[in-house]
Amino acid sequence: VTLGQRVLTKPLCIRLHYGHPDVFDKLFFITRGGISKSSKGINLSEDIFAGYNNAIRGGQVAFKEYLQVGKGRDVGMSQIYQFEAKLSQGAGEQSLSRDVYRLCQRLDFSRLLSYYFGGIGHYFSNVLTVITIYVVVYLMAILALYDLEKIGDRLITPMGTIQMLLGGLGLLHTIPLFSTLGVERGWWASLQELIQVFATGGPLHFMFHIQTKANYMTQTILVGGAKYRPTGRGFVTQHTPMDELYRFFASSHLYLGVEMGAGLVIMGFYSEAKQYFGRSWSLWLASLSFIASPFWFNPLTFDWNMVTADYVKWVSWMRGHAGGASRSWSMWWSEETSFYSKMPLTSKGWFIIKAILYL
């Protein structure tokens, strides 16, 4: 985080206010639009709007490293999920605000690009990434299903090896982490840390939260409903029951993971082109990430006593008919899909097109 703040400050000159650690010049802000905002919806990420006020009026937000403060962070999967959801919904509301429009009208091109990739553009990129994965899975399945994997009488020659090499370029994202840890702890310790991250399923965790950001960014723009989500600051080491994990992640991750997996299985059955693994390994990794991550990163997932207790709770929840969403699947489903009735027709179009695919 510190490395990113340094770069946003200098040379990009586009750092904004991001939360509690920032110190405000009270006299400066109360004479330039104030700090507080009136709407708890569109101004969900309240701190950054002070940064917008500042940048619109020609100011900059500095980053000083004269003080080090330890702050409790979210360590549980559900806590991190809620935190990312809150930030993503805040970014969705920001993209609809007049503050962002005015800021983008006044920035020069270089700072505009810096703001995009250092701000709401990060969340738009996650949305585009997930949409691309989704479209690629369906296109490959359709080509295989309708025997379109050929040009004339000649089968296409997929470049699976090249795709694997291009996928490996994603490892370049670890270079900043490796460099930072190398300077702070030493290069051998930095390498050990990276190996541990990969061995414990770190890539699945990060891919999972790409979908978290994409889901809530899209939902906020299409439907709205941004709200503050309290995440707490405690150390979460207790086991979360399966029914609770399902309620948390079903609509945002599990359904999409199963849908992608089904598409890849259909493609595997009907495809006549070679190099299936080379063409689909990254897509299978994304599907596995969406389905398995909530359970993989849940403490005591493989403890047999926990497994049997989770199964009993799951069956009870599926059969329940009263007591709220936490005790009944049917009531949870009604609450989960209630936002459809409030959606404008233009937003419903996206969901209608998606639903047609199941026919």
Image (spheres, rainbow, N blue to C red):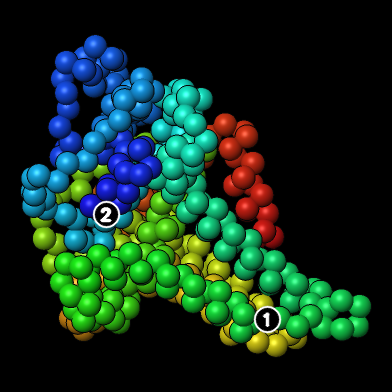
Locate the C terminus and report the quarter of the image it occupies.
bottom right
The answer, for residue 310, to whether it is visible in the render is no
The residue wearing badge 1 is 159
Amino acid type at image mark 1: Met
Position of 140 with respect to 151 (left or right) is left
Nearer the observer, 167 or 232 = 167
Residue at 44% x, 26% y: name it: 103
Nearer the observer, 188 or 336 = 188
**Separation of disc 2 and disc 1 at Cα?**
37 Å
Q: Residue 8: give its label.
A: none
Position of 31 with respect to 266 (left or right) is left
Q: Is residue 140 above or below residue 276?
A: above
Q: Specify the farthest residue to the front.
A: 11
Density class for disc 1 (Cα within 10 Å; few <14, some 14-19, many ≥20) is: few
Of the numbered discs 2 and 1, the one sitting upstream in the chain is: 2
Select label 2 or label 1 by which is in front. Answer: 2
Do the numbered discs 2 and 1 sit on residues whose CB atoms are within 8 Å? no
Amino acid type at image mark 2: Leu
Q: Is residue 260 above or below residue 71?
A: below
Residue at 50% x, 62% y: name it: 256
Q: Specify the farthest residue to the right.
A: 152
Q: Secondary structure at mark 2?
A: helix
Quarter location, residue 306: bottom left
Position of residue 201 measured from the top left corner of the image (x, y, whole percent): 32, 76
Nearer the observer, 138 or 162 = 162
The answer, for residue 226, to whether it is visible in the render is yes
The residue wearing badge 2 is 3
Position of 247 with respect to 112 (left or right) is left
Position of residue 326 measured from the top left corner of the image (x, y, whole percent): 27, 53
Q: Is residue 354 above or below residue 95?
A: below
